Image (tube, rainbow, N blue to C red):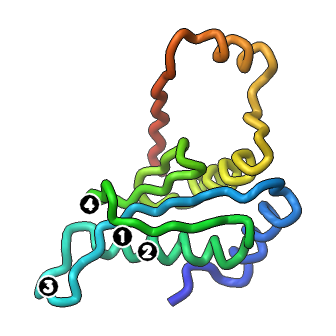
Amino acid sequence: MPTFDDVDRSYVVAQLEGRMDAPVDLTVSVRRSSPLALVPAPGAEEAARAEQLGRELASLEPRLRLMVTEDGAGDVPVFTVAGRVRFIGVPRMNLFRALLETIRRASTGDHGLAEGWAQALAQLPRPVHAQVFATPT
């Protein structure tokens, strides 16, 4: 069963089509359940949902290069954009919009930060790991 209806498909195309400059790698890390298992692996349903979402996104935007892997996969799927930004779990609603924006920005190289912030971050002496947590309301 498709993840997107016609309205969703139109929204994705409107957000990405003509707004991407370069190809972007999207990796979806999922733990698949063996077809021989009597009981599905933990998170198997969410993994299937994540893989389907990744495949549908890639089918709508030719510059999106999808790789589905089990490397490093846990019970929760992980979407990685351009090898740098990770979304843990299947992005829904606002996080889905953030995923599309992250894909677009990775393609154009536009980080979206005010000039002062970009300069300040460039001065950091070592790489920084930042996490943003979001909860549905």
Image position, residue 54 (x, y; %) = 54, 70
For the residues labelled 2 and 3, say whether their Cβ atoms are less than 8 Å apart: no
Reading the chain from its start, which is encountered first: label 2 or label 4? 2
* Residue 137 in view (yes/no): no
Give the residue at x 73% y 65%: 63
Distance from the alpha carbon under mark 1 to that under mark 3:
17 Å
Local packing at callout 4 (Cα closer than 10 Å; few below 14, some 14-19, many 20+) is some
Percent x, y for residue 117?
Answer: 72, 17
Residue 119, given in percent of the width and then of the height, sits at 73, 14
Disc 4 residue type? Asp
Residue ID for mark 2: 49
For disc 1, the marked residue is: 46
Residue 113, quarter of the rendered image:
top right
Q: Amino acid at mark 3?
A: Ala
Most extreme residue toward the left is: 38
Inter-mark Cα distance, 3 to 4: 16 Å
List the residue tagged with mark 4. 75
Which residue is identified by label 3? 37
Could you tell me if the residues under marks 1 and 2 are in contact, i.e. CB atoms within 8 Å? yes
- Residue 8 visible to an observer of this rendering: yes
- Numbered disc 4: secondary structure: loop
Residue count near mark 2 (Cα–Cα under 10 Å), binned few <14, some 14–19, many ≥20: some
The answer for how far apart the CA atoms under marks 1 and 4 are is 9 Å
Label 2 secondary element: helix
Above or below, 59 relative to 119: below
Check whether the beta carbons of the residues at disc 3 and disc 4 lie within 8 A of each other.
no
